[in-house]
Image: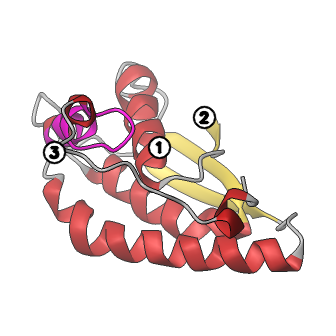
Amino acid sequence: MYFFVKCISWSCLSLALQAFFLRAIHLDLRKSWRHIIVITNEWHMKRTKAIFDTVFGLSSASKSQDSYVLDFVSVDNSLPPDILAVRQKREAESLKTFLSQTQHLWLDLADLHSWLFTKHAAYGANRFTGEIDKEKISSEMAKTY
């Protein structure tokens, strides 16, 4: 059975949450659902692939290594060239940050869960205490949303 995913997130952190919930809420509970097709924009694909490959490669709470097959399909970029350039730059920066600062923190799904709800800039409880700085985006970046 195939499970199709359309990634609509533009934030590295939200993309991590989407991948986590897809796996934890749907796929880990349905042992017959092991082939996932992830569909997103071309400009979004490298980071999407890096995050989904990481999340779906983590061991679960039972410490089993579930086996998933992920296929990635990109659709054409539909942004005007000037906006696309801003988005591509942001995606490259976000991918670099994920690979250098975040990916290594997720050793299993429990680590990812903890990170999402303590360190995540949008969902972490620490954002209410001021321990997490809210990201400020430029006016050029705001136009890409």
Residue 130, position in %: x, y?
Answer: 21, 39
Mark 1 lies on residue: 14
How was the colour assigned to the protein in this rendering?
secondary structure
Name the one closer to the observer, 125 or 17.
Answer: 125
Name the one closer to the observer, 97 or 60.
Answer: 97
Q: Quadrant of residue 105?
A: bottom left
Mark 2 lies on residue: 3
Residue 13, position in %: x, y?
Answer: 41, 48
Q: Secondary structure at mark 3?
A: loop
Q: Which residues are magenta?
A: 111-124
Mark 3 lies on residue: 108
Q: Amino acid at mark 3?
A: Asp
Which residue is drawn at the image coordinates 43% and 71% (left, top)?
95
Residues packed near mark 3 inside 10 Å, few (<14), some (14 to 19) or many (20 plus): some
Residue 25, position in %: x, y?
Answer: 40, 21
Which mark sits nearer the N-terminus, 3 or 2? Answer: 2
Does residue 80 sit above or below 26 in this rendering?
below
Residue 137, position in %: x, y?
Answer: 54, 60
Q: CA distance from mark 1 to mark 3?
A: 18 Å
Instruction: State if disc 2 and disc 3 touch (CB < 8 Å).
Output: no
